[in-house]
Amino acid sequence: MNYRSWSFIILALLCGILISSLYGLTREQIRTNSEDYANRQLLEVIGSTTAGLELIGANRYRILDEDGGLVFQVQSNEGYNGLISLWIAIDDSGNIRGVRVYNHQETPGIGDFIDRSVSDWIDRFVGRADQGHDHVSGATITSRAVINAVYQGLEESGQ
């Protein structure tokens, strides 16, 4: 091997070490930011900034306000690009208070309409008690995944 080959090998090793070190330094902050975002979505799905939450199971909370109800996590692997994670909130009557997607890998501009910051499509579930089986014209894999996840979540919640 010549000097130039060794230079590239050393440069590649240094870059690898630098990237690994940077990830190690920021891993905890990335995890914290992810949890904070999920918690903000959790409060947003309830539709009340004053409601309290009581943990009653893994990713399952009792809503402590005048409407009461539950908020729980549902995940679907049926998305076009894989996992879609949602919070679903229902009141004591079984009506949907809100649905929020807090994690997905759907294609920007095509499947990301499930994200409340992109579109209000997800609000179509609010007030429904019939498992939210609404559809979009020309339903996509993404919308079917969310609809099925909401339906599954409501069935599992007993509503």
Image (cartoon, rainbow, N blue to C red):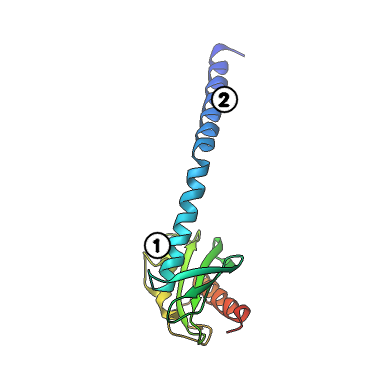
Residue 105 in the image: state x and y as whole percent.
Answer: 50, 58
Residue 5, label in figure: none
Q: Residue at x 63, y 78 (%)?
A: 156
Residue 96 in view here: yes
Comparing 23 with 80, the one in front is 23
Distance from disc 1 to disc 2, alpha carbons, whole Å, reads: 37 Å
Comparing 40 with 147, the one in front is 40
Q: Residue at x 38, y 70 (%)?
A: 50
Residue 111 in view here: no
- The answer to which quarter of the image holds residue 123 is bottom left
Q: Image quadrant for the N terminus?
A: top right
- The answer to which quarter of the image holds residue 77 is bottom right
Helix, strand or loop for disc 1: loop
Residue underneath mark 1: 109
* First in sequence: mark 1 vs mark 2: 2
Comparing 63 with 11, the one in front is 63
